[in-house]
């Protein structure tokens, strides 16, 4: 499903939710109280700003006596091939998150990737992916990144390892573009970036990628990823322990301004390399 048609489908979801809510005589606040979310969330569902969690949709259907229509619509919209199976549930959690902290040891985080970067990464893992699937996954990754432009965007704190600035994914031109994109997001304060330099030693690389997510109305979760596999840690106690792996990395990372200088310097070097090839 293309981005435009997917957006239209979510708008239909919201319009239909509003219609059925009003027919049932509920205000947004009243329906929110029945399904255990703030009333403002119902308004964001209806405006297609925020995508509801499955359990919330199920409670909406039960409250409005909809015979499961919103659950079926949501499953149809979420169940696609834009994300790897092991990452789909974690991707779903990004939209309602109020804070996302992540450590990336080798690749720029998906929320910060450009289309060209996302395409290069998708083609590399694995290299025999059909073109249609590549387009879907690139589209999904770029759509995910749009939450950083939303009015309800989460606080996003990214710690990429210096590897991310040096590994030639897609060639120097693509690398320069992605680093300039990250620098731009940092300059406009859409994301806080701290680079973990090589001088911190091997521990950071061995830690693996880690994403921590916090929510207004739900316990925190953590997501770890390895080669073509991932693990969503829903247990709040486990998610809190996962932070113990993130906090030392944050302490060892360069300050934000020094990180931005390093990113922009690497981007400038890559631009020069691209112009000579």
Image (cartoon, grey):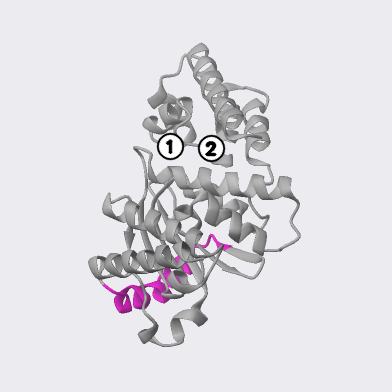
Around disc 1, counting alpha carbons within 10 Å, would you say few (fewer than 14), some (14 to 19), or many (20 or more)? Answer: some
Rendered location of residue 136, percent (x, y): 65, 45
Rendered location of residue 205, percent (x, y): 49, 80
Mark 2 / mark 1, whichever is N-terminal: 1
Residue at 48% over, 49% down: 94
Task: Looking at the picture, tell me which residue is in the foreground, 146 or 44.
Answer: 146
Residue at 66% over, 55% down: 84
Task: Looking at the picture, tell me which residue is in the foreground, 77 or 266.
Answer: 266
Element at badge 2?
helix
Numbered range of the magenta stretch: 232-254
Element at badge 1?
loop
* Residue 75: assigned label: none
- Residue labelled with disc 2: 56
Rendered location of residue 242, percent (x, y): 45, 71
Around disc 2, counting alpha carbons within 10 Å, would you say few (fewer than 14), some (14 to 19), or many (20 or more)? Answer: some
Residue at 59% over, 44% down: 139
Give the residue at the far front of this rendering: 276
Q: Quadrant of residue 200?
A: bottom left
- Is 111 on the left-hand or right-hand side of 266? right
Asked whether the beta carbons under mark 2 and mark 1 sit within 8 Å of each other, the answer is yes
Rendered location of residue 102, percent (x, y): 43, 64
Image vertical order of residue 15 relative to residue 167, above or below? above
**Magenta includes 15?**
no
Q: Quadrant of residue 85?
A: bottom right
Give the residue at the far top of this rendering: 23
- Residue labelled with disc 1: 37
The quadrant the N terminus occupies is top right
């Amino acid at each position: 499903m293309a981005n435009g048609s997917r957006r239209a489908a979510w708008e239909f979801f919201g319009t239909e939710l509003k219609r059925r809510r009003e027919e049932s005589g509920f205000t947004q606040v009243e329906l929110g109280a029945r399904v255990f979310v703030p009333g403002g969330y119902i308004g964001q569902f209806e405006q297609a700003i925020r995508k509801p969690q499955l359990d919330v949709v199920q409670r909406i259907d039960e409250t409005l006596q909809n015979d499961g229509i919103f659950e079926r619509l949501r499953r149809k919209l979420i169940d696609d091939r834009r994300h790897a199976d092991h990452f789909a549930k974690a991707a779903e959690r990004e939209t309602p998150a109020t804070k996302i902290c992540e450590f990336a040891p080798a690749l720029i985080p998906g929320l910060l990737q450009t289309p060209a970067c996302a395409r290069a990464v998708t083609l590399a893992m694995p290299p025999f992916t059909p073109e249609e699937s590549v387009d879907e996954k690139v589209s999904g990754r770029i759509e995910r990144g749009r939450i950083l432009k939303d009015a309800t965007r989460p606080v996003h704190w990214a710690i990429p390892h210096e590897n991310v600035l040096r590994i030639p994914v897609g060639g120097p031109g693509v690398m320069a573009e992605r680093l300039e994109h990250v620098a731009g997001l940092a300059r406009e304060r859409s994301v806080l970036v701290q680079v973990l330099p090589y001088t911190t030693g091997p521990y950071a690389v061995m830690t693996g990628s880690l994403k921590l997510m916090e929510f207004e109305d739900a316990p925190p979760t953590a997501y770890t990823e390895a080669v073509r596999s991932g693990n969503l840690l829903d247990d709040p106690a486990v998610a809190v322990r996962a932070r113990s792996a993130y906090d030392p990395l944050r302490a060892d990372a360069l300050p934000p301004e020094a990180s931005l200088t390093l990113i922009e310097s690497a981007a400038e070097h890559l631009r020069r390399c691209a112009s000579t090839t």
